[in-house]
Image (cartoon, rainbow, N blue to C red):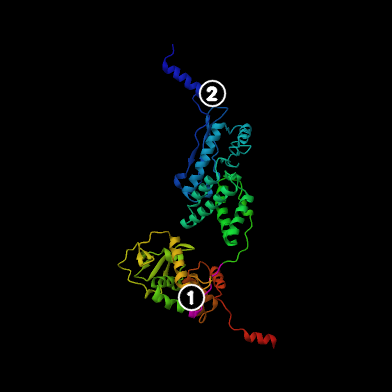
Amino acid sequence: MPNFKELITFEYENEYESAYDLSLKPNFSSPKIYSAKGDLTKRWYIYFSFRHPDNGKLMRQTPFYGNANKYKTKEDRMSVLVIYRKVLLRLLKKGYNPYSDNLELHKSLHRKNSVAVPADLTNKNLEKSTPLPEKTSMTVKEAFEFGIKLKEKVISQTTKRDYESKLRNLQEWLSANQPEIKYINELNKKVVTSFLNYVLNKNSARTRNNYKSDLSSIIQVLVDNEIIHNNFLKKIPKLKSTPERNKTYAQHTQEEIFEYLKINDPILLLYIKFISYNFLRPIEVCRLKVKDIDIENKRVQFKAKNSPLKTKIIPELLWMDLPDLTKLDKEAILFTPDKIGSEWNTEIRNRRDYFSKRFRKVVKEHFKLGRDYGLYSFRHTYITKVYRALMKDSSPFEAKSKLMLITGHSSMTALEKYLRDIDAELPEDYSTMLKNVHG
Protein backbone atom coordinates (compact mmCIF):
# COMPACT_ATOMS: atom_id res chain seq x y z
CA MET A 1 0.00 0.00 0.00
CA PRO A 2 1.55 3.35 -1.07
CA ASN A 3 2.35 5.76 1.73
CA PHE A 4 1.54 9.48 1.83
CA LYS A 5 4.91 10.55 0.41
CA GLU A 6 4.50 8.28 -2.60
CA LEU A 7 0.98 9.58 -3.28
CA ILE A 8 2.17 13.17 -3.13
CA THR A 9 5.10 12.40 -5.44
CA PHE A 10 2.84 10.61 -7.94
CA GLU A 11 0.36 13.51 -8.11
CA TYR A 12 3.21 16.06 -8.30
CA GLU A 13 4.76 14.25 -11.25
CA ASN A 14 1.38 13.99 -13.00
CA GLU A 15 0.86 17.74 -12.61
CA TYR A 16 4.23 18.55 -14.21
CA GLU A 17 3.83 15.89 -16.88
CA SER A 18 0.61 17.48 -18.08
CA ALA A 19 2.26 20.87 -18.17
CA TYR A 20 5.63 19.99 -19.66
CA ASP A 21 5.23 16.49 -21.13
CA LEU A 22 8.38 15.42 -19.20
CA SER A 23 8.09 14.39 -15.55
CA LEU A 24 9.76 16.93 -13.27
CA LYS A 25 11.53 18.41 -16.29
CA PRO A 26 10.21 21.75 -17.56
CA ASN A 27 10.87 22.43 -21.23
CA PHE A 28 12.67 25.72 -20.61
CA SER A 29 14.70 27.65 -18.09
CA SER A 30 13.54 31.01 -16.84
CA PRO A 31 15.03 33.78 -19.05
CA LYS A 32 17.88 35.67 -17.40
CA ILE A 33 19.55 39.02 -18.02
CA TYR A 34 23.26 39.25 -18.77
CA SER A 35 24.51 42.72 -17.82
CA ALA A 36 28.29 42.20 -18.21
CA LYS A 37 28.74 43.27 -14.58
CA GLY A 38 27.65 46.76 -15.56
CA ASP A 39 30.22 47.15 -18.36
CA LEU A 40 28.54 49.35 -21.00
CA THR A 41 31.25 48.59 -23.57
CA LYS A 42 29.98 45.00 -23.78
CA ARG A 43 26.69 43.74 -25.16
CA TRP A 44 23.88 43.03 -22.73
CA TYR A 45 21.17 40.48 -23.52
CA ILE A 46 18.62 37.99 -22.25
CA TYR A 47 19.27 34.26 -22.50
CA PHE A 48 17.48 30.99 -21.76
CA SER A 49 17.69 27.27 -22.41
CA PHE A 50 15.11 25.03 -24.06
CA ARG A 51 14.82 21.24 -24.05
CA HIS A 52 15.95 19.73 -27.35
CA PRO A 53 13.31 17.39 -28.84
CA ASP A 54 15.92 14.79 -29.87
CA ASN A 55 18.17 14.36 -26.84
CA GLY A 56 15.87 15.76 -24.12
CA LYS A 57 18.59 18.06 -22.81
CA LEU A 58 18.22 21.75 -22.00
CA MET A 59 20.16 23.56 -24.74
CA ARG A 60 21.29 27.19 -24.50
CA GLN A 61 19.51 29.31 -27.12
CA THR A 62 20.80 32.27 -29.11
CA PRO A 63 20.89 35.38 -26.88
CA PHE A 64 18.32 38.07 -27.57
CA TYR A 65 19.69 41.65 -27.72
CA GLY A 66 16.84 43.68 -29.19
CA ASN A 67 17.58 47.42 -28.97
CA ALA A 68 19.08 47.30 -25.48
CA ASN A 69 22.67 48.06 -26.45
CA LYS A 70 21.87 51.33 -28.17
CA TYR A 71 21.27 52.86 -24.72
CA LYS A 72 24.27 54.36 -22.95
CA THR A 73 23.28 54.12 -19.28
CA LYS A 74 22.90 51.08 -17.05
CA GLU A 75 19.39 52.11 -15.99
CA ASP A 76 18.12 52.43 -19.56
CA ARG A 77 19.55 49.11 -20.69
CA MET A 78 18.19 47.29 -17.68
CA SER A 79 14.72 48.83 -18.13
CA VAL A 80 14.56 47.53 -21.71
CA LEU A 81 15.87 44.06 -20.88
CA VAL A 82 13.45 43.64 -17.97
CA ILE A 83 10.57 44.13 -20.41
CA TYR A 84 12.09 41.72 -22.96
CA ARG A 85 12.55 39.11 -20.24
CA LYS A 86 8.98 39.49 -18.98
CA VAL A 87 7.46 39.12 -22.45
CA LEU A 88 9.70 36.19 -23.45
CA LEU A 89 8.78 34.33 -20.27
CA ARG A 90 5.10 34.89 -21.04
CA LEU A 91 5.58 33.50 -24.55
CA LEU A 92 7.42 30.44 -23.27
CA LYS A 93 4.58 29.74 -20.86
CA LYS A 94 2.11 30.10 -23.73
CA GLY A 95 3.97 27.47 -25.73
CA TYR A 96 6.72 29.19 -27.68
CA ASN A 97 9.19 26.57 -28.96
CA PRO A 98 12.42 27.60 -30.75
CA TYR A 99 12.44 24.19 -32.49
CA SER A 100 9.06 24.64 -34.17
CA ASP A 101 7.46 27.19 -36.50
CA ASN A 102 5.16 28.55 -33.74
CA LEU A 103 2.49 29.29 -36.34
CA GLU A 104 -0.40 28.25 -34.12
CA LEU A 105 0.95 30.35 -31.24
CA HIS A 106 1.30 33.28 -33.59
CA LYS A 107 -2.32 32.96 -34.77
CA SER A 108 -3.59 32.45 -31.24
CA LEU A 109 -1.87 35.56 -29.93
CA HIS A 110 -3.12 37.71 -32.78
CA ARG A 111 -6.67 36.46 -32.29
CA LYS A 112 -6.47 37.51 -28.65
CA ASN A 113 -4.87 40.81 -29.74
CA SER A 114 -2.64 40.76 -26.70
CA VAL A 115 0.92 40.29 -27.95
CA ALA A 116 2.49 41.27 -31.25
CA VAL A 117 4.62 38.31 -32.35
CA PRO A 118 6.29 37.72 -35.72
CA ALA A 119 5.12 34.70 -37.69
CA ASP A 120 8.48 32.92 -37.47
CA LEU A 121 10.21 32.80 -34.08
CA THR A 122 12.66 29.96 -34.66
CA ASN A 123 15.94 29.84 -32.77
CA LYS A 124 17.69 30.76 -36.00
CA ASN A 125 16.07 34.15 -36.40
CA LEU A 126 14.92 35.06 -32.88
CA GLU A 127 17.55 37.80 -32.61
CA LYS A 128 16.68 39.28 -36.00
CA SER A 129 12.92 39.27 -35.62
CA THR A 130 10.77 41.99 -34.12
CA PRO A 131 11.01 42.08 -30.29
CA LEU A 132 8.10 40.95 -28.24
CA PRO A 133 6.39 43.87 -26.48
CA GLU A 134 2.81 44.03 -25.40
CA LYS A 135 0.53 45.57 -28.01
CA THR A 136 -2.54 46.84 -26.25
CA SER A 137 -1.92 46.26 -22.55
CA MET A 138 -0.05 49.59 -22.21
CA THR A 139 -2.34 52.57 -21.85
CA VAL A 140 -1.49 56.05 -23.10
CA LYS A 141 -0.69 57.11 -19.54
CA GLU A 142 1.49 54.06 -18.86
CA ALA A 143 3.35 54.48 -22.16
CA PHE A 144 4.09 58.15 -21.50
CA GLU A 145 5.28 57.36 -17.97
CA PHE A 146 7.55 54.67 -19.41
CA GLY A 147 8.92 57.13 -21.98
CA ILE A 148 9.60 59.80 -19.36
CA LYS A 149 11.30 57.29 -17.07
CA LEU A 150 13.82 56.38 -19.76
CA LYS A 151 14.19 59.92 -21.06
CA GLU A 152 14.83 61.49 -17.64
CA LYS A 153 18.27 59.88 -17.54
CA VAL A 154 19.53 62.11 -20.34
CA ILE A 155 17.60 65.37 -19.84
CA SER A 156 17.56 68.11 -17.21
CA GLN A 157 14.82 68.45 -14.61
CA THR A 158 13.54 71.55 -16.40
CA THR A 159 13.23 69.68 -19.68
CA LYS A 160 11.57 66.78 -17.90
CA ARG A 161 8.95 69.11 -16.45
CA ASP A 162 8.33 70.59 -19.91
CA TYR A 163 7.80 67.09 -21.33
CA GLU A 164 5.48 66.12 -18.48
CA SER A 165 3.45 69.32 -18.91
CA LYS A 166 2.96 68.73 -22.65
CA LEU A 167 2.09 65.05 -22.16
CA ARG A 168 -0.40 65.99 -19.44
CA ASN A 169 -2.05 68.55 -21.74
CA LEU A 170 -2.30 65.96 -24.51
CA GLN A 171 -3.94 63.46 -22.14
CA GLU A 172 -6.42 66.05 -20.92
CA TRP A 173 -7.26 66.93 -24.53
CA LEU A 174 -7.75 63.23 -25.33
CA SER A 175 -10.11 62.81 -22.36
CA ALA A 176 -12.21 65.73 -23.56
CA ASN A 177 -12.11 65.15 -27.33
CA GLN A 178 -11.16 61.50 -27.93
CA PRO A 179 -12.35 59.64 -24.80
CA GLU A 180 -12.48 56.31 -26.66
CA ILE A 181 -8.68 56.28 -27.00
CA LYS A 182 -7.24 54.29 -24.11
CA TYR A 183 -4.20 52.47 -25.45
CA ILE A 184 -1.01 53.90 -26.89
CA ASN A 185 -1.29 51.98 -30.19
CA GLU A 186 -4.59 53.80 -30.83
CA LEU A 187 -2.77 57.13 -31.01
CA ASN A 188 -2.06 58.13 -34.60
CA LYS A 189 -1.05 61.02 -36.85
CA LYS A 190 -4.61 62.25 -37.39
CA VAL A 191 -5.38 62.45 -33.66
CA VAL A 192 -2.12 64.19 -32.72
CA THR A 193 -2.44 66.61 -35.65
CA SER A 194 -5.85 67.65 -34.28
CA PHE A 195 -4.25 68.23 -30.88
CA LEU A 196 -1.44 70.31 -32.41
CA ASN A 197 -4.03 72.40 -34.26
CA TYR A 198 -5.71 73.00 -30.90
CA VAL A 199 -2.37 74.17 -29.46
CA LEU A 200 -1.81 76.43 -32.48
CA ASN A 201 -5.21 78.10 -32.09
CA LYS A 202 -4.55 78.82 -28.42
CA ASN A 203 -0.92 79.88 -28.73
CA SER A 204 1.50 80.34 -31.62
CA ALA A 205 3.23 78.40 -34.38
CA ARG A 206 6.38 78.35 -32.28
CA THR A 207 4.57 76.80 -29.30
CA ARG A 208 2.89 74.28 -31.61
CA ASN A 209 6.29 73.32 -33.06
CA ASN A 210 7.72 72.92 -29.56
CA TYR A 211 4.88 70.54 -28.70
CA LYS A 212 5.53 68.56 -31.86
CA SER A 213 9.25 68.28 -31.08
CA ASP A 214 8.82 67.21 -27.44
CA LEU A 215 6.02 64.73 -28.17
CA SER A 216 8.09 63.26 -30.99
CA SER A 217 11.00 62.77 -28.61
CA ILE A 218 8.87 60.69 -26.22
CA ILE A 219 7.16 58.76 -29.02
CA GLN A 220 10.60 57.88 -30.41
CA VAL A 221 11.51 56.28 -27.07
CA LEU A 222 8.39 54.11 -27.39
CA VAL A 223 9.36 53.17 -30.96
CA ASP A 224 12.92 52.33 -29.91
CA ASN A 225 11.50 50.01 -27.26
CA GLU A 226 8.93 48.67 -29.74
CA ILE A 227 5.96 49.69 -27.67
CA ILE A 228 4.55 51.14 -30.91
CA HIS A 229 5.62 50.60 -34.51
CA ASN A 230 6.49 54.04 -35.88
CA ASN A 231 6.96 57.68 -34.96
CA PHE A 232 4.11 59.27 -36.90
CA LEU A 233 5.02 62.73 -35.54
CA LYS A 234 7.98 62.82 -37.91
CA LYS A 235 5.47 62.95 -40.77
CA ILE A 236 3.70 66.00 -39.33
CA PRO A 237 5.24 69.13 -40.92
CA LYS A 238 6.82 71.88 -38.89
CA LEU A 239 5.12 75.25 -39.31
CA LYS A 240 7.04 78.36 -40.25
CA SER A 241 7.31 80.67 -37.28
CA THR A 242 8.93 84.03 -36.70
CA PRO A 243 11.30 83.75 -33.72
CA GLU A 244 10.96 86.33 -30.98
CA ARG A 245 14.00 88.56 -30.71
CA ASN A 246 15.02 91.04 -28.09
CA LYS A 247 16.36 94.29 -29.55
CA THR A 248 19.53 95.95 -28.33
CA TYR A 249 19.13 99.09 -26.23
CA ALA A 250 20.17 102.51 -27.47
CA GLN A 251 23.10 103.88 -25.44
CA HIS A 252 21.06 106.59 -23.71
CA THR A 253 18.23 104.16 -22.83
CA GLN A 254 20.59 101.66 -21.23
CA GLU A 255 22.27 104.40 -19.20
CA GLU A 256 18.93 105.79 -18.02
CA ILE A 257 17.80 102.32 -16.90
CA PHE A 258 20.98 101.79 -14.89
CA GLU A 259 20.70 105.20 -13.21
CA TYR A 260 17.05 104.59 -12.37
CA LEU A 261 17.73 101.13 -10.88
CA LYS A 262 20.69 102.40 -8.87
CA ILE A 263 18.15 104.26 -6.73
CA ASN A 264 14.98 102.18 -7.10
CA ASP A 265 16.14 98.53 -7.27
CA PRO A 266 19.87 97.83 -6.63
CA ILE A 267 19.32 94.04 -6.51
CA LEU A 268 17.73 94.00 -9.95
CA LEU A 269 20.52 96.26 -11.23
CA LEU A 270 23.22 93.83 -10.06
CA TYR A 271 21.25 90.95 -11.57
CA ILE A 272 21.20 92.80 -14.91
CA LYS A 273 24.93 93.57 -14.67
CA PHE A 274 25.70 89.82 -14.53
CA ILE A 275 23.78 89.55 -17.80
CA SER A 276 25.42 92.66 -19.26
CA TYR A 277 29.05 92.36 -18.13
CA ASN A 278 29.46 88.59 -17.83
CA PHE A 279 27.12 87.78 -20.72
CA LEU A 280 25.19 85.20 -18.71
CA ARG A 281 21.67 84.21 -19.65
CA PRO A 282 18.96 85.14 -17.10
CA ILE A 283 18.43 81.50 -16.05
CA GLU A 284 22.19 81.07 -15.61
CA VAL A 285 22.24 84.02 -13.20
CA CYS A 286 19.32 82.49 -11.30
CA ARG A 287 21.27 79.25 -10.80
CA LEU A 288 24.20 81.00 -9.10
CA LYS A 289 25.00 80.29 -5.48
CA VAL A 290 27.47 82.16 -3.28
CA LYS A 291 29.94 79.27 -3.63
CA ASP A 292 29.99 79.74 -7.42
CA ILE A 293 31.85 83.03 -6.98
CA ASP A 294 35.59 82.41 -6.68
CA ILE A 295 36.55 85.41 -4.56
CA GLU A 296 40.28 84.79 -4.68
CA ASN A 297 40.54 84.51 -8.47
CA LYS A 298 37.56 86.72 -9.37
CA ARG A 299 35.80 84.06 -11.39
CA VAL A 300 32.32 82.62 -11.63
CA GLN A 301 31.30 79.03 -12.35
CA PHE A 302 27.87 78.27 -13.75
CA LYS A 303 25.83 75.70 -15.64
CA ALA A 304 25.57 76.95 -19.21
CA LYS A 305 23.13 76.18 -21.99
CA ASN A 306 25.64 74.21 -24.04
CA SER A 307 27.81 72.57 -21.36
CA PRO A 308 27.50 71.16 -17.84
CA LEU A 309 29.86 73.70 -16.22
CA LYS A 310 31.62 76.84 -17.42
CA THR A 311 34.06 79.24 -15.82
CA LYS A 312 34.34 82.93 -16.68
CA ILE A 313 36.36 85.79 -15.25
CA ILE A 314 34.40 88.50 -13.49
CA PRO A 315 35.42 91.83 -15.04
CA GLU A 316 36.58 94.53 -12.65
CA LEU A 317 33.60 96.68 -13.64
CA LEU A 318 31.28 94.05 -12.14
CA TRP A 319 33.56 92.99 -9.30
CA MET A 320 33.50 96.50 -7.80
CA ASP A 321 29.69 96.27 -7.48
CA LEU A 322 29.66 92.96 -5.61
CA PRO A 323 29.03 93.07 -1.85
CA ASP A 324 31.28 91.24 0.63
CA LEU A 325 30.48 87.55 0.12
CA THR A 326 32.98 86.08 2.60
CA LYS A 327 30.56 85.91 5.52
CA LEU A 328 27.62 84.47 3.58
CA ASP A 329 26.50 80.85 3.53
CA LYS A 330 28.24 79.18 0.59
CA GLU A 331 25.06 77.25 -0.29
CA ALA A 332 22.88 80.37 -0.33
CA ILE A 333 21.23 81.50 -3.58
CA LEU A 334 23.10 84.56 -4.85
CA PHE A 335 20.01 86.44 -6.11
CA THR A 336 16.84 86.35 -4.02
CA PRO A 337 13.93 88.82 -3.92
CA ASP A 338 15.13 90.74 -0.85
CA LYS A 339 18.88 90.30 -0.51
CA ILE A 340 22.08 88.99 -2.05
CA GLY A 341 22.95 85.54 -0.70
CA SER A 342 20.00 83.99 1.11
CA GLU A 343 17.60 81.03 1.12
CA TRP A 344 14.99 80.78 -1.64
CA ASN A 345 13.22 77.44 -1.75
CA THR A 346 11.68 77.50 -5.19
CA GLU A 347 12.45 75.94 -8.54
CA ILE A 348 14.93 77.56 -10.90
CA ARG A 349 12.22 78.29 -13.45
CA ASN A 350 10.20 80.17 -10.83
CA ARG A 351 13.24 82.28 -9.94
CA ARG A 352 13.75 83.23 -13.57
CA ASP A 353 10.08 84.09 -14.00
CA TYR A 354 10.14 86.16 -10.83
CA PHE A 355 12.95 88.41 -12.06
CA SER A 356 11.38 88.67 -15.52
CA LYS A 357 8.14 89.92 -13.96
CA ARG A 358 10.04 92.23 -11.63
CA PHE A 359 11.90 93.73 -14.59
CA ARG A 360 8.65 94.20 -16.47
CA LYS A 361 7.02 96.01 -13.55
CA VAL A 362 9.99 98.11 -12.40
CA VAL A 363 11.63 98.93 -15.74
CA LYS A 364 9.42 98.25 -18.73
CA GLU A 365 6.34 99.93 -17.34
CA HIS A 366 8.32 102.94 -16.13
CA PHE A 367 10.18 103.47 -19.42
CA LYS A 368 7.23 102.30 -21.55
CA LEU A 369 9.35 99.76 -23.41
CA GLY A 370 7.81 97.56 -26.10
CA ARG A 371 7.65 93.76 -26.08
CA ASP A 372 10.91 93.58 -28.09
CA TYR A 373 12.92 94.75 -25.08
CA GLY A 374 13.72 92.44 -22.20
CA LEU A 375 16.49 91.11 -19.98
CA TYR A 376 18.15 89.41 -22.95
CA SER A 377 18.43 92.82 -24.58
CA PHE A 378 21.22 93.73 -22.15
CA ARG A 379 23.25 90.69 -23.20
CA HIS A 380 22.79 91.62 -26.87
CA THR A 381 23.65 95.26 -26.17
CA TYR A 382 26.94 94.60 -24.42
CA ILE A 383 28.10 91.83 -26.76
CA THR A 384 27.56 94.32 -29.60
CA LYS A 385 29.59 96.96 -27.72
CA VAL A 386 32.51 94.60 -27.10
CA TYR A 387 32.51 93.27 -30.66
CA ARG A 388 32.58 96.72 -32.22
CA ALA A 389 35.35 97.78 -29.84
CA LEU A 390 37.42 94.72 -30.83
CA MET A 391 36.84 95.45 -34.52
CA LYS A 392 38.62 98.80 -34.21
CA ASP A 393 42.03 97.17 -33.74
CA SER A 394 41.53 93.65 -35.15
CA SER A 395 40.45 91.83 -38.29
CA PRO A 396 36.93 90.35 -38.22
CA PHE A 397 38.32 86.85 -37.55
CA GLU A 398 40.60 88.05 -34.74
CA ALA A 399 37.77 90.05 -33.18
CA LYS A 400 35.41 87.05 -33.26
CA SER A 401 38.08 84.72 -31.88
CA LYS A 402 38.59 87.02 -28.89
CA LEU A 403 34.84 87.51 -28.50
CA MET A 404 34.25 83.73 -28.38
CA LEU A 405 36.40 83.52 -25.24
CA ILE A 406 34.34 86.26 -23.63
CA THR A 407 30.80 85.17 -24.59
CA GLY A 408 31.35 81.42 -24.27
CA HIS A 409 29.81 80.46 -27.62
CA SER A 410 30.67 76.86 -28.49
CA SER A 411 31.78 77.51 -32.08
CA MET A 412 32.62 80.30 -34.50
CA THR A 413 29.56 79.37 -36.55
CA ALA A 414 27.29 79.78 -33.52
CA LEU A 415 28.85 83.14 -32.66
CA GLU A 416 28.56 84.44 -36.23
CA LYS A 417 24.89 83.45 -36.39
CA TYR A 418 24.28 85.17 -33.06
CA LEU A 419 26.01 88.37 -34.24
CA ARG A 420 23.90 88.39 -37.41
CA ASP A 421 20.71 87.85 -35.43
CA ILE A 422 21.36 90.85 -33.16
CA ASP A 423 22.66 93.02 -36.03
CA ALA A 424 26.02 93.47 -34.35
CA GLU A 425 27.80 93.30 -37.69
CA LEU A 426 27.08 96.44 -39.66
CA PRO A 427 29.05 97.75 -42.67
CA GLU A 428 30.81 101.09 -42.78
CA ASP A 429 29.15 103.96 -44.60
CA TYR A 430 28.99 103.02 -48.31
CA SER A 431 27.90 106.42 -49.67
CA THR A 432 31.03 106.63 -51.84
CA MET A 433 30.07 103.39 -53.55
CA LEU A 434 26.57 104.71 -54.22
CA LYS A 435 28.02 107.87 -55.76
CA ASN A 436 30.24 105.77 -58.00
CA VAL A 437 27.31 103.65 -59.10
CA HIS A 438 25.22 106.67 -60.09
CA GLY A 439 28.33 108.57 -61.31
Which residue sits at x=55%, y=38%? Answer: 62
Reading the image, the residue beneath label 1 is: 367
Label 1: how many Cα within 10 Å (few below 14, some 14–19, many 20+): few
Asked where in the image residue 347 lies, by quadrant, the reply is bottom left
Based on the picture, tell me whether residue 249 belongs to the magenta stretch.
yes
Asked where in the image residue 268 lies, by quadrant, the reply is bottom left
Which residue sits at x=57%, y=43%? Answer: 183
Relative to residue 228, is residue 439 drawn left or right?
Answer: right
Q: Are marks 2 and 1 in contact (CB under 8 Å)?
A: no
Tell how many labels.
2
Which corner quadrant holds the N terminus?
top left
The CA distance from mark 2 to mark 1 is: 87 Å
Q: Which residues are magenta?
A: 244-253
Question: Percent from the top left, x then y, of residue 418?
Answer: 54, 70
Relative to residue 310, is residue 104 drawn left or right?
Answer: right
Relative to residue 91, is residue 299 drawn left or right?
Answer: left
Q: Nearer the viewer, mark 2 or mark 1?
A: 1
- 82 relative to 262, above or below: above
Q: Is residue 278 visible?
A: no
Reading the image, the residue beneath label 2 is: 18
Extreme bottom residue here? 439
Based on the picture, tell me whether residue 393 belongs to the magenta stretch.
no
Mark 2: secondary structure: helix
